[in-house]
Image (spheres, rainbow, N blue to C red):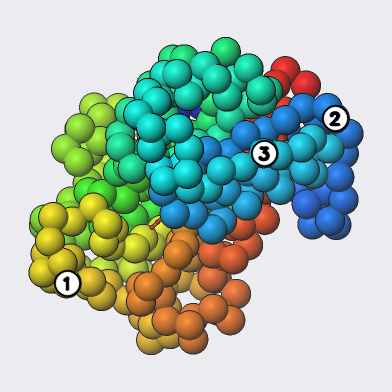
């Protein structure tokens, strides 16, 4: 593994190795400690798009590995991109300074372009609507930790399946495991891209597509809820049509299985009522801790530590 750009590049063996390493780091995260595994190493975070969790999570992961962090969270306005520097050159330049790079950008393919120039590992923190491989990793790690298995379960993936990059990564990773039943819940206009649905069907997975969350919530083990991706719509009116289309309420949770887990990459707008937060099945805040452990495992692996 040289970079992590596309979630489909990871094999099942690589996923399992990352999760077992992340499990080892979990006590370090939970107890607020640090290791010396990446002592002397520097992570650069280059963010061309807003972020709260992802950037802090990458940076905290490096700090808990005993390394250091340099960060520019306004790359679009406050870096040489403003002067016209190409992503390729930025990759080459930053890789002369840092030992590893995490990057987020609004355009699909942009992180791969920067990685082409980079001499050090690059991690994709989200490239437009395409992919969000580290969020996908932490979602699978959450399922493994909270459900106890990565096989033989039903997952409902709900909301904006067209523009939501996280759900694309989740499907790529889950396609490496057996016996997963996929229920895609979205309005017709925000359906899962056909290439993902077809890839799953070709690999022999059962895929159900519906617009009706109510009728399927009782049959799922994992519910992955997502935000309607306002920033990807052509117009505000178009976005308004779909905003609030699926809202998880305590009443709806009443129809779900007792052992179901409810995930969300966050931020939430209105897709999950705050009254659901105290439900023991709500795992979206726990996911954040899992994310730091997974990113520690990823950084350590990419740096060959
Ligand atoms: C997601 C993202 O940026 O794609 N957030 C995250 O990284 N936790 C989800 C979203 O913005 O809806």
| Residue 58 sits in quarter | top right
Judged from the image, the secondary structure of the residue bearing numbered disc 1 is helix
- Kindly identify which residue carries mark 2: 39
Q: Is residue 117 above or below residue 135?
A: above
Counting from the top left corner in percent of width and height, residue 293 is at: 70, 45
| Residue 242 sits in quarter | bottom left
- Kindly identify which residue carries mark 1: 240
Residue extending furthest toward the front: 83
Work out whether mark 2 precedes mark 3 in sequence or the reverse, and give the earlier one. 2
- Which of the two residues, 281 or 56, is positioned nearer the viewer here? 56
The residue sitting at 71% across, 39% down in the picture is 69
- Residues packed near mark 2 inside 10 Å, few (<14), some (14 to 19) or many (20 plus): some
- Which of the two residues, 241 or 213, is positioned nearer the viewer here? 241
The residue sitting at 67% across, 45% down in the picture is 59
The residue sitting at 63% across, 49% down in the picture is 57
Q: Calculate the distance from the C-alpha at mark 1 to the C-alpha at mark 2.
A: 48 Å
Q: Calculate the distance from the C-alpha at mark 2 to the C-alpha at mark 3.
A: 15 Å
Quadrant, the N terminus: top right
- Residues packed near mark 3 inside 10 Å, few (<14), some (14 to 19) or many (20 plus): few
């Amino acid at each position: 593994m040289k970079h992590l750009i596309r979630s489909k590049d990871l094999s099942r063996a690589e996923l399992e190795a990352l999760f077992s390493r992340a499990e080892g780091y979990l006590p370090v995260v939970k107890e607020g400690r640090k290791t010396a595994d990446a002592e002397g190493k520097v992570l650069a975070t280059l963010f061309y798009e807003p972020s709260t969790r992802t950037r802090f999570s990458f940076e905290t992961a490096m700090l808990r590995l005993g390394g250091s962090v340099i960060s520019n969270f306004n790359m679009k306005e406050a870096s040489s991109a403003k002067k016209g520097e190409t992503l390729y050159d930025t990759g080459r330049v930053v890789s002369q300074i840092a030992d590893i790079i995490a990057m987020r950008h609004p355009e699909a393919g942009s992180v791969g372009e920067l990685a082409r120039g980079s001499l050090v590992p690059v991690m994709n923190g989200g490239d437009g609507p395409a992919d969000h491989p580290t969020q996908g990793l932490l979602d699978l790690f959450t399922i493994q930790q909270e459900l106890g298995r990565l096989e033989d379960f039903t997952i409902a993936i709900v909301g904006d399946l067209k523009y939501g990059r996280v759900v694309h990564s989740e499907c790529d990773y889950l396609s490496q495991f057996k016996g997963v039943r996929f229920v895609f819940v979205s309005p017709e206009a925000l359906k899962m891209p056909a290439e993902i649905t077809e890839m799953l069907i070709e690999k022999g997975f059962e895929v159900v597509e519906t617009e009706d969350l109510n009728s399927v919530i009782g049959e799922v083990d994992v519910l992955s809820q997502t935000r309607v991706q306002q920033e990807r719509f052509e117009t505000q009116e178009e976005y308004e049509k779909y905003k609030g289309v699926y809202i998880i309420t305590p009443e709806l949770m009443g129809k779900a299985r007792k052992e179901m887990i409810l995930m969300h990459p966050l931020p939430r707008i209105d897709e999950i009522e705050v009254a659901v937060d105290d439900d023991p099945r709500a795992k979206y805040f726990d996911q954040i801790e899992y994310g730091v452990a997974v990113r520690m495992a990823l950084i350590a692996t990419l740096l060959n530590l």
